[in-house]
Image: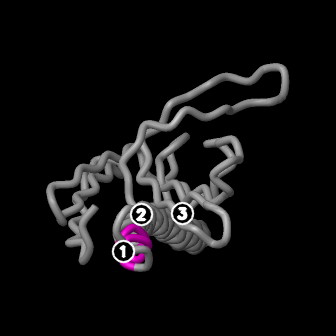
């Protein structure tokens, strides 16, 4: 009788141990899967941000490709709450259009995002209120003849957006 009791105890202990090992390995597999998924999502978001930024800049440049529309500027703007305002300077790709009165579109980076500010030329500039396009950390641009090069840094990646303008000036 004693032998039967210890046999059941050993087989019960074995089943319990097997269940514990299964639970530990299942947990490890879930954690590894979560880590792999997060890595894939981060890489995908970084890739999408660079694609969105380059497509956005190219489409804005192509849409307004007219003589005298583009300029590369350092723009002073006001940020913060009333009474605690401060002035900041941002590098911006500025597009000027006349729709009966002059309007300005500024494409710039502020507070970790590529932004767009569209307003009348007479209105003040508030960089923190621009429409967010995608994450970005720095935007610089240079124009050599009809070739406009926009350098955009997103995380560890620097992307050059080259656009050959059809018009000069």
Residue 32 appears in the picture as rendered: no
Q: Where 92 sits versus 76, above or below?
A: below
Q: Relative to the observer, which residue lies in front, 142 or 134?
A: 142
Q: CA distance from mark 1 to mark 3?
A: 21 Å
Asked if one can make out residue 104 in the rendered structure from this viewpoint, the answer is: yes
Which image quarter: residue 148? bottom left
Residue that numbered label 2 is attached to: 69
Mark 2, residues whose alpha carbon is within 10 Å: few (<14), some, or many (≥20)?
some
Tell whether 136 sits left or right of 2: left
Residues under numbered marks 1 and 2 in contact, where contact means CB atoms less than 8 Å apart = yes
Is 26 or 135 nearer to us in this picture? 135
> Which residue appears at 41% of the width and 53% of the height?
93
- Residue placed under numbered mark 3 in the picture: 133
Q: Which mark is residue 65?
A: 1
The location of residue 133, given as percent across then percent down, is 54, 63
Residue 94 in magenta?
Answer: no
Q: Quadrant of residue 138?
A: top left
Q: Give the SS element for disc 1.
A: loop
Mark 2 or mark 3, which is nearer to you?
2
Name the element at disc 3: strand
Q: Which residues are magenta?
A: 55-62
């Amino acid at each position: 009788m004693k032998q039967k009791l210890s046999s059941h105890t050993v087989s019960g202990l074995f089943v319990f141990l097997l269940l514990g090992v299964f639970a530990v390995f299942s947990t490890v597999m879930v954690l590894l899967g979560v880590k792999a998924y997060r890595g894939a999502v981060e890489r995908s978001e970084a890739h999408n941000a660079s694609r969105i930024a380059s497509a956005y800049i190219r489409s804005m440049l192509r849409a307004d490709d007219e003589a005298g529309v583009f300029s590369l500027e350092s723009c002073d703007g006001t940020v913060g709450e009333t009474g605690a305002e401060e002035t900041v300077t941002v590098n911006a790709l500025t597009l000027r259009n006349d729709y009966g009165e002059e309007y300005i579109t500024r494409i710039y980076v502020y507070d970790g995002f590529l932004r767009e500010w569209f307003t009348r030329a007479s209105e003040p500039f508030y960089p923190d209120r621009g429409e967010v396009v995608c994450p970005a950390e720095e935007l610089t641009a240079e124009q050599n003849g009809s070739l406009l090069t926009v350098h955009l840094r997103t995380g560890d990646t620097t992307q050059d957006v080259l656009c050959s303008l059809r018009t000069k000036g």
